[in-house]
Image (cartoon, helix red, strand yellow):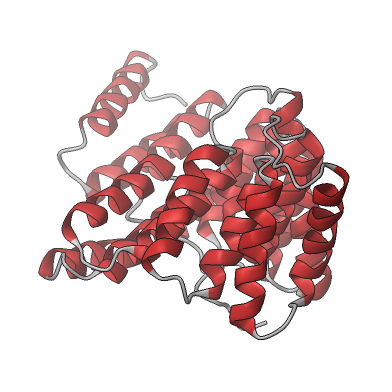
């Protein structure tokens, strides 16, 4: 499978380039959208939204920004906000099929069946026929309308309907699975249903593209949030097997091995991260902590020194190194 823009992993150097590109011409909406898409793929949703809102304030022709913002809100389960932004995107560019399609999906999950069916019909007219992905939704919507005398529903969205929308969105925008994970801690029943829907979509994509590491990365994040650490480790390691230079997957594996009580494997993966991304100071600091907790104080000191080689002003690395050196001196240099 050729890696599409929707599936490229986050790249910090690329992010810097995008920010610089944006500063050179903030009136171009696509520059804001590209930056927001990269931030979203990294799970930095607050920054992604901020980038899009900044674009709405500075750029002209902002329909694409509204569309992405709507998808991000939908992926996070904030369907009313998603509908508002998708509706405005469709109003700005009524001839864009994708905007109408996604608006119809969100309207359906909000229980607005009449509005959803009307939007679907507009999308189908624009496409010149009934796309397979919409045929089932249109059929269900028309049946609901017939049974309710064409009165639009105003009930809160049902969990199954929400899950169906999430599954549809993730199937088209796999990076939204990372956005859905959000935060840490135990997920509640509704969040777990959403995560399972995202996983179903990712598994179907894996069946079609079994060699794509990003899909396994997404599966691992979802499994972690569901508390299935063994499965999360298996998926993260599969991503690494497919792409041995996948630093983000290796860093995820570090966290998972720590949760699983396997510090040796965590340190091994963290070492690999520092080899792949020597400029990531946090990785050196993390490795130093793991090594010190295992009694490998000399190796831990080396990790902190490497952090200082990257940034000599890193006070955390300097403080930890000094503490280690004092401990070693107190033991007469013993490890």
Above or below 80: residue 115: below
Across and down, in percent, residue 48 comes to 37, 49
Question: Residue shown at 20%/63% (left/top)?
Answer: 59
Above or below 183: residue 281: below
For the residue pair 5 and 240, the one nearer the viewer reads as: 5
Above or below 275: residue 252: above
Question: Residue shown at 28%/62% (left/top)?
Answer: 32
Question: Residue shown at 77%/43% (left/top)?
Answer: 161
Across and down, in percent, residue 256 comes to 66, 38
For the residue pair 64 and 226, the one nearer the viewer reads as: 64
Above or below 260: residue 181: below
Please tell me how many numbered marks the rendered image carries. Answer: 0
Question: Residue shown at 45%/71% (left/top)?
Answer: 94
Across and down, in percent, residue 63 comes to 36, 64
Q: Quadrant of the N terminus?
A: bottom right
For the residue pair 226 and 118, the one nearer the viewer reads as: 118
């Amino acid at each position: 499978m050729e890696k599409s823009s929707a599936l490229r992993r986050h790249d910090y150097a690329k992010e810097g380039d995008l920010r610089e590109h944006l500063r050179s011409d903030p009136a171009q909406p696509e520059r804001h959208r590209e930056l927001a898409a990269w931030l979203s793929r990294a799970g930095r949703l607050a920054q992604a939204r901020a980038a899009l809102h900044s674009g709405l304030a500075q750029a002209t022709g902002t329909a694409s920004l509204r569309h992405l913002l709507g998808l991000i809100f939908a992926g996070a389960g904030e369907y009313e906000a998603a509908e508002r932004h998708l509706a405005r995107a469709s109003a700005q560019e009524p001839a864009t099929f994708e905007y109408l399609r996604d608006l119809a999906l969100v309207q359906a999950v909000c229980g607005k069946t009449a509005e959803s069916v009307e939007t679907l019909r507009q999308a189908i007219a624009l496409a010149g026929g009934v796309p397979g992905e919409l045929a089932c939704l249109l059929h269900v919507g028309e049946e609901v309308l017939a049974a309710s005398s064409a009165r639009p529903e105003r009930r809160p969205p049902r969990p199954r309907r929400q899950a169906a929308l999430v599954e549809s969105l993730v199937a088209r925008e796999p990076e939204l699975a990372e956005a859905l994970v959000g935060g840490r801690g135990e997920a509640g029943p509704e969040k777990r249903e959403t995560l399972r829907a995202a996983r179903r979509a990712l598994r179907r994509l894996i069946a079609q593209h079994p060699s794509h590491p990003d899909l396994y990365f997404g599966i691992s994040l979802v499994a972690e949030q569901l508390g299935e650490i063994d499965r999360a480790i298996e998926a993260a390691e599969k991503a690494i097997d497919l792409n041995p230079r996948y630093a983000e997957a290796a860093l995820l594996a570090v966290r998972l091995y720590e949760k699983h009580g396997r510090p040796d494997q965590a340190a091994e993966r963290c070492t690999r991260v520092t080899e792949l991304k020597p400029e990531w100071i946090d990785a050196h600091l993390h490795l130093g902590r793991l090594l010190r907790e295992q009694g490998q104080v000399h190796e831990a000191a080396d990790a902190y020194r490497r952090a200082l080689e990257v940034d000599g002003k890193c006070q955390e690395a300097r403080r930890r190194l000094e503490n280690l050196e004092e401990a070693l001196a107190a033991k007469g240099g013993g490890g």
